[in-house]
Amino acid sequence: ENVRKPSGSSAVEVWLKFGVTDSVGENVVKGIKDLGLNEEVKAFSGTRYVFECDSAPLNFETAVKKILLNPLIHDYKIA
């Protein structure tokens, strides 16, 4: 939520579901351990898309589901 979005825009966050291999998150944890930090760390990756559009919310969510994610492996949130 630290990333600003222009007023009148919509944002979508997409990430892998629990149990799906997140190689980016795993590499972040490995990099932290390689730096010598031995604390328990969890890292997860995701993508935030910001759109400036006048589309109705229902049409927007339908487009998001068809284009930006695979419902078998991704969860999402429209912000």
Image (cartoon, rainbow, N blue to C red):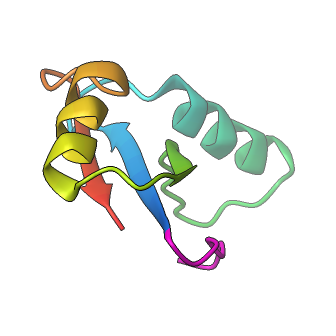
Q: Residue furthest right?
A: 35
- Magenta stretch containing residue 34, yes or no? no
Tell me where residue 71 appears, x and y as whole percent: 15, 26
Q: Which residue is nearer to you in this view: 54 or 19?
A: 54
Number of marks: 0
Which picture quadrant has residue 29? top right
Quarter containing the C terminus: bottom left
Left or right: residue 2 compared with residue 20: right
Q: Which residue is nearer to you in this view: 56 or 66?
A: 56
Chief secondary structure of the magenta span?
loop
Tell me where residue 10 appears, x and y as whole percent: 44, 61
Q: Residue furthest front?
A: 54
**Residue at (65% x, 72% y) in the render:** 3
Tell me where residue 44 appears, x and y as whole percent: 47, 48
**Residue at (30% x, 26% y) in the render:** 69
Using the image, determine if residue 52 lies above or below residue 68: below
Which picture quadrant has residue 65? top left
Left or right: residue 5 compared with residue 22: right
- Magenta stretch containing residue 3, yes or no? yes
Report the magenta residues as a range.
Answer: 1-8
Q: Which residue is nearer to you in this view: 7 or 32?
A: 7
Using the image, determine if residue 70 lies above or below residue 54: above
Tell me where residue 37 appears, x and y as whole percent: 76, 60
**Residue at (52% x, 43% y) in the render:** 47
Which picture quadrant has residue 28? top right
**Residue at (61% x, 66% y) in the render:** 39
